[in-house]
Image (spheres, helix red, strand yellow):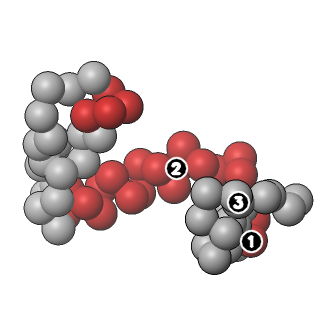
Amino acid sequence: MEFENSVLPEMEVMTQEDMGFNSDAKEAVAFAILANEAINGHFNNIPKATGAKHPVVMGKICM
């Protein structure tokens, strides 16, 4: 599938399939990204998506 990107024409828009991911696995990919952010001590609560008042590192990962 090809997308038009008129706001940033120099940027290539890719689908998950273009990057080797199955679109059906997007929830698992999202959780993996959020876990990676937590492991690295980065904010992972996505305030704009969750309505949180401020960004925080959520959860504790024990290895």
Local SS, label 3: loop
Visible in this render: residue 3? yes
Mark 1 Cα-neighbour bin, 10 Å: few <14, some 14–19, many ≥20: few
Local SS, label 2: helix
Image position of 9 with respect to 31: above or below: below
Give left or right: position of 63 versus 33: left
Could you say which is closer to the camera, residue 4 or residue 28?
4
The span from disc 1 to disc 3 (Cα, nearest Å) is: 16 Å
Q: Residue at x 37, y 31 (%)?
A: 49
Query: What residue is shown with label 2?
Result: 28
Q: Mark 3 or 2, which is nearer the eye?
A: 3
Q: Where residue 21 appears, x then y in whole percent? A: 67, 65
Sequence order check, earlier mark of 3 and 2? 3
Could you say which is closer to the camera, residue 6 or residue 36?
6
Q: Residue at x 12, y 61 (%)?
A: 41
Local SS, label 1: helix
Give the number of marks.
3
Query: What residue is shown with label 3?
Result: 5
Mark 3 Cα-neighbour bin, 10 Å: few <14, some 14–19, many ≥20: few
Mark 2 Cα-neighbour bin, 10 Å: few <14, some 14–19, many ≥20: few
Amino acid type of the residue tagged 2 in the rendering: Ala
Amino acid type of the residue tagged 1 in the rendering: Asp
Amino acid type of the residue tagged 3 in the rendering: Asn
Q: Mark 1 or 3, which is nearer the eye?
A: 3
The span from disc 2 to disc 1 (Cα, nearest Å) is: 17 Å
Could you say which is closer to the camera, residue 43 or residue 31?
43
Visible in this render: residue 21? no
